[in-house]
Image (tube, rainbow, N blue to C red):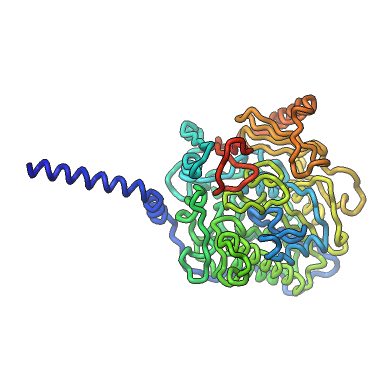
Amino acid sequence: MKLWTWLVAAVLVLAMALGAAVLNRATILAMVAHARLPHVEPNHPVTWAQGPATPPQGQRPPNVVFILADDLGFNDITFNGGGVANGAVPTPNIDSIGHEGVNFANGYAGNATCAPSRAAIMTGRYATRFGFEFTPAPVAFERMVGTEAEPGAIREPKFFKDRLNQMPEGSTAASAEAVNLLSVPTGEITIAEVLKTRGYHTLHFGKWHLGGKKGSRPEDQGFNESLGFIAGASMYLPEHDKGVENSKQSWDAIDRFLWPNLPYQVQYNGSPMFAPKGYMTDYLADEAVKSIHANRNRPFFMYFAPNAIHTPLQAKKEDYDALPQIKDHRLRVYGAMARNLDRNVGRILQALKDEGLDKNTLVIFTSDNGGAGYIGLPDINKPYRGFKSTFFEGGIHAPFFMRWPGVIRPGSRFSYPVGHVDIFATAAAAAHASVPTDRAIDGVDLLPYLSGQATGRPHQTLFWRSGQYKVVLDGDWKLQSSEAQNKVWLYNLAADPTERAELSRAEPARVRAMLALLKAQDAADAKPIWPSLLQGPVFVDHPGGMKQKPGDEYVLWDN
C-alpha cells in the first residue's frame, strides 16, 4: 500500500511539474535563451580613423549622410501635421530635412519589412532580383511566430516545418550565429563600394541585417568603418537598467521572442562584441558625431541606421518623464523613443554645421518600412491603411526627405512615386560615381527631376514581393495579389490615396493587365535564397492586441 501511495504521489508531483512547465513555458524559454546569449565585453572607446589635418584645396565632392529610421510610421513625425499622440511629440529636427529640402510625398520603401528594404537601398535593386526576399530570422523565431497566435485569433499562423531541409547549410543550427548565414550575395555591389571608387571614406552605424557571413558584413561590403550590430534588432539598454522604461506586448509572439534573445552589444569592424555606453540611439549618435569630426577634411558617406523605433519598446527615463501628458504607458514609451530619435538626428545635423560641412552635404532621411501593427498602436501610419508586413500604403508609404543646400530648393515637394531603390543612383550621381552596368539597376537618379532637367515620372512601375504576396504600382493604379488567399485588391491612388475604394470587380481588364506585369517581373527575379518558413495574418485596419472579428481585412505575410 505504501508503494502505491508513493507512486500516486510521484505521478501527482510529475503532473504538477509538467503543468507548471506549460504555464511557465515563456519563462523557461527565456532562461534557455539567456543562457545562449553571446559573451559581451565591457564598453571600450572606438578610435575613428582620422582624415587629413587640413581641408583639401578647391571644390570637394559632397558628403552624403543617409539616416534610416527603423519601423518609423508615416504619422510618427510632425512634418505632415500629425505625430505621436496627436502631435504631443514634436520632431523638429527630422522635419527640418524636409522643410530645408524636398519632401517626396509619395516615397516608397523597398519592402514592407526591414531586411529586403535595406538590401534595395544598399544596391539600388529590388532585393528579389538576387533572392534576398525574406527577412533573416532564427528558426526559433520563425517557429514561435508561426505557431503562436494572438489570444482569440480567428486566423492562425502557419510554420512550414517541412521546408527546413531547404534552408542553407548551417542556418538552422541552435546558435546565435546561424542566422548570419542568411545573407545578401557577396557579388552584390553596395552604394558604399560605389562611393569608395571616388575616394569617399565610408561609415556605418547601427543595424545591418543583411547577413553576417564572410563577404556579407558591412566591412566586407564597402564600409571602411562599421559600428553596430548584424542582427535585425537590439536592446537599447539592459531590461532592468535604472534609466529605462519598458513596454512589453504580451499578445505578440515577436515581442515575446525579442526580450530574452537580444543582447545589448555592438561590434566595431567585426571585433568581439562589447557593450555600448548608455542608451543605444544616444551612443550611436555620440560616435557618429565623433566620426564627422574625424572626417571633416575628406568626403565621407555615413549610413546612420539606428534600431529606433523598432521593438523592444524601451525609452530613456528622461524622455519618458518629459511626456506626462501621454497617459497610455505603451504610447508614452513609444513617443519617448521618437523624441530621442529626433534629438539625435538633430545632433548629427548640428555636427555638420559645427564642422562647416552642412552646405556641402546631401542629407537623406527615410524609414525602412511603415510602423508595426504588432505594437498595438492604431494611428502610427495614419492616414494610410495597413502596417509593416503589408503592402497597403501603411506598410510601404514612408517619410522620405532629401536636403542639399544650393542644389535642392528648400520647401520642395515632389509628388510622383519614388522609392528606396533611387537612393543608390542619386547618391552615386551626387558623387559623380558610375553605377554598375553589368546588372539591372531599378533605381534612378532623382536630382534631374528636382532641378527641372527631367520631367514626368521617374518610374512607370514599381514592384514588391514577399513570397506569394505581390504588388505592382503602375502609374496611379496599385494592385495587390495574395495568391494564398486567391484575392486581389485594386486601387486608383490618384483618386483614393488611402485605399478605401476597392475596384477589382469594376476593372477586370486592368486586373488582368497588372497581373501580367507581376508575372513578367517574377520571371526577371531570382529564386529566394531560402524559403519562407512562416505565413501569418496581418490585419489591415487594426493593430495587434485588439479583438479580431470575422470580416476584418487581413493579408497573409510570408517570411
Task: Locate residue 130: give its quadrant.
Answer: top right
Give residue 392's position: percent from left, percent from top: 69, 42
Asked whether residue 210 is in view, the answer is: no
Nearest the camera: 411 or 63? 411
Give residue 483's position: percent from left, percent from top: 63, 29
Nearest the camera: 224 or 425? 425
Question: In the drawing, does residue 492 fall left or right of residue 123?
Answer: right
Q: Quadrant of the C terminus?
A: top right
Residue at the spot 54% in from the left edge and 70% down from the top edge: 277
Asked whether residue 34 is in view, the answer is: yes
Give residue 134's position: percent from left, percent from top: 59, 41
Task: Locate residue 512: give its quadrant.
Answer: top right
Question: In the drawing, does residue 279 fall left or right of residue 415?
Answer: left
Nearest the camera: 16 or 96? 16
Residue at the spot 74% in from the left edge and 35% down from the top edge: 502
Nearest the camera: 306 or 298? 306
Question: In the drawing, does residue 534 fall left or right of residue 501?
Answer: left
Q: Is 337 situated above or below 474?
A: below
Tally of numbered discs: 0
Give residue 59's position: percent from left, percent from top: 85, 66
Q: Quadrant of the N terminus?
A: top left
Q: Is 420 situated above or below 309?
A: above
